[in-house]
Structures are given as C-alpha cells and as structure tokens.
Image (cartoon, rainbow, N blue to C red):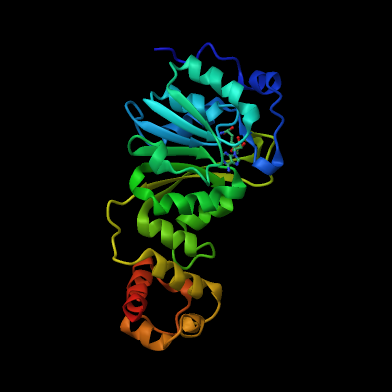
C-alpha cells in the first residue's frame, strides 16, 4: 500500500498549481501536519471506514485522513484549480480518494456514499452552518462528523443552557447528536490566517434522540423563543399563535423564564405541546 510519502510538501503543491487563496471560497489552508493528523484522528480508527471530506483544497487534511487508513475518501471541492493537485494525492494513496467537483450544499450524500461514513472537514466558513443543518437532517448516513468552524459557531454548537452562545444551533445539534469540543486552532496555523480562532467539534449522531420531538416543530418553537431571547417565554412564544402561557404550563415550564434557561429536554416537551395543537 502506498502511503503518500512520495508527495511534495503542501507549500510546493500550492505554488506549483497556483492555488492562491480565494476569500469568496472561504479558503484558509491548513498546512501544519501535526494539526491535520490531530483532526484526522478525532473520529477514532479509520481503517476500513468511508470518509466524506468537504473542501479538500490542496489536500493537506485529505492526506492525513488517507494516512489514517480510511478505506475510501470522497472529497467534494468547488474550486476546479485544486483538481490536478488532488489527482496526485489520489494516485499516491492507491486511488482510495475520489474527488467530486461541485458544491457540497447541492450534492446528495445519499446518492454519493455507498455506506455510512464519517465526515471530516475544515469547512468553508461561509457555508458551514447550512452544511451542518443539512447533515443533521441526514444524520443516519453518518457515523460521526469532525468539523472545523470559526470558534463562535463551535461555541454555539456545544453551549449549555444559561450561556450567551446557547441557542438554536446548540439545541438542534445536541438533541440529535452527542457533541464535544475537541480543540481550538490559532489563526497563525492557516495560510492565509483568518481573522478569528477556529474550533474543531465532533458530533456523533444518536441512533434515537433522547427526547421525542418533531424537528420542524422544534425548530419553530426554538426560533420563536430565541428570536426575542431577552423576553419572557410567555411573550416571545406569542408569535406561534394560541396561548403561550397555556402551552408553557402544560409542558411544566414557568412562563416567566427566558429561552436560554430551558434545557434541550424542556424545548422538546414544549414542542410536543405545540405539535399536538396543529
Ligand atoms: N481542506 C483544506 C485545508 O484544510 O487546508 C481547505 C479548507 S478551506 C477552509 C475550505 C475549502 O472548501 C476550500 O478548498 C474551498 O475551495 C472549498 N469550498 C468552498 N465552498 C465550497 C462548497 N460550497 N462546496 C465544496 N467545497 C467548497
């Protein structure tokens, strides 16, 4: 089995293929091999596993995933300038890498992936949240997701009730997945350096959520509650129609509480009351 050791250093690849970073594509390349290796180890053993990577760019993280022994890697890249460099990576790793040129937001993982896969990605920041929401909806296709976000988004995914970062993303992610922050990465580690610190978060989809709820109703209730997060729930939930006070009392929640004081379980209970009203 070839191990990629024949590949040139990433800086050389970037220069040779003229991969000047494009801001509009969220391109901040990670060239530090210790860090790419650390990210690729987050899901656990990859031998025999299928991996989906979004935005491989010049292929730094891709090399680390392949070096961890992944059986096959599907990588979706929008920037056609990267394709020649990625073809070299594929060849150096026994063609275990398949590159798909396209927009990750539009690609159907269901059609692409032959089996349940791990997602590993240093995400383009401008599409990171919509991609996460899409994957949460299709979570049964994924064994785990190891994703790099800007720290502010990573904090929102892992936030606990009572904190400023707690909101829609925390509740939906934590209802459907076991989430854990892995580590922060300084802007200095990237070429070019972004303005903000990045965070790697791991999400492992639950086979069944801990509390019953319907995703659409839960999203509506959470959006109404956090749409006016400083208001008491009896006021912020009025936009959902019907008596907010009655719904809250039926769910055993004090109507004078604010959105950030409710646990994921509270929100699920409340959304079930609203679902029964529909
Ligand atoms: N994985 C590389 C690394 O770690 O150095 C590059 C990461 S860079 C933050 C994001 C990558 O996503 C870029 O290569 C960019 O071209 C690609 N990209 C941006 N938008 C995309 C989209 N909608 N679909 C697929 N790839 C996208």
At a point 53% along the width and 53% down the height, the residue shown is 130
Q: Is residue 147 left or right of residue 175?
A: right
Q: Is residue 22 left or right of residue 3?
A: right
- Report the residue that reaches farthest toward the front: 111
Can residue 252 be seen here? no
Question: Which of 212/33 is in front?
Answer: 212
Above or below: residue 197 compared with residue 208: above
Question: Which of 77/193 is in front?
Answer: 77
At a point 54% along the width and 25% down the height, the residue shown is 33
Query: Which percent across, then down, holds residue 227?
Result: 55, 73
Above or below: residue 239 compared with residue 19: below
At a point 52% along the width and 27% down the height, the residue shown is 34
Quadrant where the N terminus sits is: top left
At a point 28% along the width and 51% down the height, the residue shown is 207
Question: Which of 27/32 is in front?
Answer: 27
Can residue 45 be seen here? yes
Question: Which of 176/25 is in front?
Answer: 25
Above or below: residue 56 compared with residue 96: below
Q: Is residue 205 left or right of residue 77?
A: left
Residue 108 is drawn in which quadrant?
top left
Residue 251 is drawn in which quadrant?
bottom left
Query: Which percent across, then down, holds residue 14?
Result: 67, 23
Residue 30 is drawn in which quadrant?
top right
Query: Which percent across, then down, holds residue 276?
Result: 31, 78
Above or below: residue 47 compared with residue 229: above
Query: Which percent across, then down, holds residue 6?
Result: 53, 11
């Amino acid at each position: 089995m070839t191990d990629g050791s024949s590949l040139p250093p990433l800086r050389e690849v970037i220069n040779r293929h003229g991969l000047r970073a494009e801001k509009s594509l969220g391109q901040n390349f990670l060239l530090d091999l210790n860090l790419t290796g650390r990210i690729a180890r987050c899901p656990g053993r990859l031998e025999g596993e299928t991996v989906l990577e979004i935005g491989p760019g010049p292929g730094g993280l891709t090399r680390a995933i392949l070096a961890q022994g992944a059986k096959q890697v599907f990588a979706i890249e929008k920037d056609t300038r990267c394709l020649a460099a990625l073809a070299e990576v594929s060849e150096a790793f026994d063609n275990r890498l398949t590159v798909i040129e396209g927009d990750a937001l539009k690609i159907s993982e269901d059609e692409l992936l032959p089996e349940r896969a791990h997602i590993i990605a240093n995400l383009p920041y401008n599409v990171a949240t919509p991609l996460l929401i899409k994957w949460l909806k299709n979570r049964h296709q994924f064994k785990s997701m190891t994703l790099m976000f800007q720290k502010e988004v990573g904090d929102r995914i892992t936030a606990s009730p009572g904190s400023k970062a707690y909101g829609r993303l925390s509740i939906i992610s934590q209802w459907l997945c076991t989430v854990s922050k892995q580590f922060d990465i300084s802007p200095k580690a990237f070429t070019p350096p972004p303005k903000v610190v990045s965070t790697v978060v791991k999400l492992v989809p639950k086979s069944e959520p801990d509390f019953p709820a319907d995703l659409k109703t839960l999203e509506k209730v959470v959006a109404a509650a956090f749409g006016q997060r400083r208001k008491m729930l009896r006021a912020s939930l009025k936009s959902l129609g019907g008596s907010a006070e009655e719904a809250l009392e039926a769910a055993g929640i004090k109507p004078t509480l604010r959105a950030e004081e409710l646990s994921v379980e509270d929100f699920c209970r409340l959304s079930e009351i609203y679902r029964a009203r529909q």
